[in-house]
Amino acid sequence: MDILVTGAGIGGLAAALSLQHAGFDRVRIVEAAPELRPLGAGVNLLPNAVRELAALGLFDELVTAAARTDEIRYYARTGGLIWRDDRSAGSGHRWPQLSLQRGRLHTVLTEAVRARLGADAIVTDSRLTGFTELPGGRLRTTLRHGRGASSSTLDTDVLVGADGIRSAVRATLHPHEDGPAWNGTTVWRGTTRMPPFLGGTSMLVTGDGTQKVVAYAMSPDLDREGRTLVNWAASRPADGGAEADRSDWNRPVPQAKFLPHFRDWDLGFLDVTALLAGASGAFEYPMLDRDPLPRWSFGHTTLLGDAAHAMCPMGSGGTTQAVIDARALAYCLATSGGIEAALTAYEEHRRPAMTELQLANRNMGPEIVIDMTYDRAPAGFRQATDVIPAAELADVARHHARIGAFDPAAASTGSPWTV
Ligand SMILES: Cc1cc2nc3c(=O)[nH]c(=O)nc-3n(C[C@H](O)[C@H](O)[C@H](O)COP(=O)(O)OP(=O)(O)OC[C@H]3O[C@@H](n4cnc5c(N)ncnc54)[C@H](O)[C@@H]3O)c2cc1C
């Protein structure tokens, strides 16, 4: 069976590896970019994604490339601790949460694909522009090369659209759908070399009713000066400058553009203003997602990762869920009778939960605890539980982990997706 994956992002690469692991060896990826480069800043792999990548034999490589994140701490801008979400082994998690540079993860997966499926398994400079169904259900894809200088066709039995938030496969399946939705928030991100804060294994989320900053270490070791590499993202409602169609992850902006909004932000253990100012550069993008879809699979074609369910980046789920999609898809193709039945089964496993997660993330996901405490105590508090009962705070984190299937009960079992 020929399987064509569109897009060599984390989702497409994980799909190729999962398919190969499940017994499919005629798997190819077409990627629009002229060459594969280790792009992006930090991403997180939640425990369920780490388990699935471990099942693919990649655990040791990932651990040596990543920082372990043992807890998520939510702080009010005024400095009070709101909630602590424990992700350590002591909390019942068998697999760690790993924070790492997207480029490192991309390189680990790319090298594994080339080693296992062949040096030519990833075909770059090949943008899928459309596809049609042939008699019998096979598909004929059209690919554009060299910025449109030439084109070619490629036939396949199965087409997997892993081509990101502006997926061409999705646009072909749902031609009347609007593009990405913008929630009016601008995000700036960067990386700063600095001594670790909170022991170096904590992700920090801090904010008030308007602005937020997320920061975490993402390098496995300290450098000679005792510094780690911290990834941060700062967000606030747009002043009118950001536009929804500027979704490039690598659009540089001067820090002066946003630093005035984040001045005098000091949590005591971390000077947030200095963190943002200390970066070597900064990038801006609008916070986009996609509307949940009523259907992912049509005949021999389906969607995966951001192409299927791009979500607002609350709770670090985008990359994790792309990996889980990949494993679930391979499992269904290997265990269901026929391609259409397999793609339907895959969608039944994944779409309902991803729809719930997309909608929860539109409503701030687990970061909602910051807005909840700010609404009730804008000037700050002595203890967060004086303002919100601990059970209510715990419920927010528990609910989010349950939808994303990374709570200890779901994520500490063996992989449900190993054939
Ligand atoms: C360059 C880049 C940098 C990023 N940086 C970060 C970051 O710092 N932090 C973070 O949290 N998330 C980042 N993301 C997003 C994050 O990687 C994804 O949300 C998540 O990993 C899900 O991945 P995906 O494979 O579904 O989609 P993506 O990572 O978006 O990958 C989609 C891939 O498909 C390719 N593609 C698109 N259209 C076509 C087409 N028509 N034909 C062929 N190929 C196509 C793209 O070039 C890309 O390689 C970044 C994404 C990209 C593309």
Image: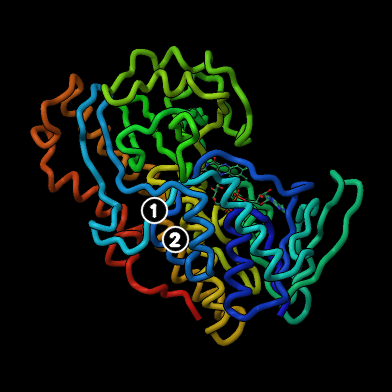
* Side of 284 relative to 27 (left or right): left
Q: Are marks 1 and 2 in contact (CB under 8 Å)?
A: yes
Q: In this view, does 133 lie above or below 48?
A: below
Q: Residue at 20% x, 22% y: name it.
A: 378
Q: Which of 119 and 219 is in front in this view?
A: 219
Image x and y of residue 100, in percent? 49, 46
Q: Which color scheme is applied?
A: rainbow
Q: Residue at 80% x, 71% y: name it.
A: 155
Q: In this view, does 144 lie above or below 200?
A: below
Where's the N terminus, which quadrant? bottom right
* Side of 242 relative to 202 (left or right): right
CA distance separating discs 1 and 2? 7 Å
* Side of 115 relative to 240 (left or right): right
Please, which residue is most extreme toward the front here? Answer: 224
Q: Mark 1 points at which residue?
A: 97
Q: Nearer the viewer, residue 187 or 274?
A: 274
Whether the residue under disc 2 has CB within 8 Å of ligand 1 = no
Does label 1 or label 2 sit earlier along the sequence? 2
Label 1 crowd (10 A; few <14 / some 14-19 / many >=20): many
Task: Kindly identify which numbered label has been placed on residue 50.
Answer: 2
Q: Is mark 1 on a helix, strand or loop?
A: strand
Q: Is residue 18 above or below residue 291?
A: below
Task: Kindly identify which numbered label has been placed on residue 272.
Answer: none
Please, which residue is most extreme toward the bottom here? Answer: 337
Q: Is residue 250 above or below residue 28?
A: above
Q: Is mark 2 on a helix, strand or loop?
A: helix
Image x and y of residue 319, in percent? 50, 52
